[in-house]
Image (cartoon, rainbow, N blue to C red):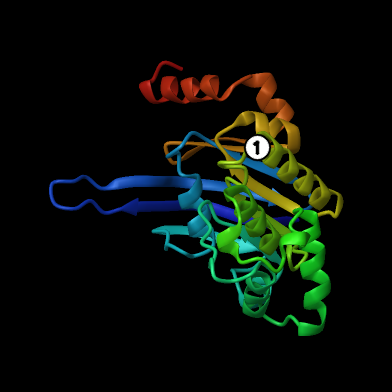
Amino acid sequence: MSVLLVEKLNKTFKGGLFEKDRHVLQDVSFHLPEGETTGFVGSNGAGKTTTIKCIFDFIRPDSGRIDFFGSPLSSESKTRIGYLPERPYLYEFLTGMEFLRLHWNLCYGLTQKDFIERAHEALKKVDLFDARDRRLRTYSKGMLQRAGIAQAILTRPDLLILDEPMSGLDPDGRALVKDILREEQKRGVTLFFSSHLLQDMEELCSRLVVVNKGKILYEGALTQFMAEFQSLEKAFQVQKNREAGNV
């Protein structure tokens, strides 16, 4: 079963005066098998964040099909999805617990009686339980990133989508985030996260979706990708040669 299906996604941003239109996504297609971890990898500007924004309907694609759990995105399916954007905005005047309660209240069909248990569980996982009553303005950058991850896993989602979850973290912070993702894997979550570092994918993923210049270069098993290409640079060179008609 595909937890997320993306078919022929296209997005063009119109240029202004004397500017050309930018074709950001070109027939992007991939799927996420249930219970597997898929890495979404590509260089900066490859189209990863635009794809994720289209998936959630934050920006409208020009064309394409997107299904969650076999149907278009709905209020019900949103409660089964955890999401961390590339640059999360956290209200600095809220405490850690208040921030999580805000997101809990925005979710469809959740009862208040479960909130405390789930919030404490999420905060302990990201090592912020002792800071739960501090205002977010007192958190470090790494703590804020972990608070964002806490809200993503708060509802025990079936699908977890994280856009550059380890961006800007120090080595200790990156190690902690990887441990959190491994815990979610053990829980059976379908995990999809983006990065421009293939090393992150090698440690955590069974599958890869590789994007470059708005086109999907590869979708499939990580082991097969490594056997064929060894590096992103080689994959990008293969695409360049194809476009130039050399292969």
The structure residue drawn at horizontal position 68% and vertical position 23%, both measured from the top left corner, is 226
Whether residue 177 is visible: yes
- Give the image location of residue 7, x and y in percent: 54, 53
Q: Is residue 206 left or right of 51 when viewed as pictured?
A: right
> Is residue 84 toward the left or the right of residue 122 in the image?
left
Q: Is residue 160 above or below residue 238?
A: below
Report the front residue among 29 and 135: 135
At 71% from the left and 26% from the top, the residue drawn is 224
Q: Which residue sits furthest top?
A: 246
- Comparing 100 with 83, the one in front is 100
Residue 53 appears at what percent x and percent y?
49, 57
The residue depicted at 25 percent of the width and 48 percent of the height is 21
Count of numbered tags:
1
Q: Secondary structure at mark 1?
A: strand
Q: Residue 94: where, in percent of width, then height?
A: 59, 71
Residue 154 higher or lower than 9, as above or below: below
- 15 up-or-down from 89: above or below: above
- In the picture, residue 246 is in which quadrant? top left
Q: Position of residue 206 (x, y in %)?
A: 75, 37
Q: Of the residues shown, which amino acid type is indicated by label 1?
A: Leu
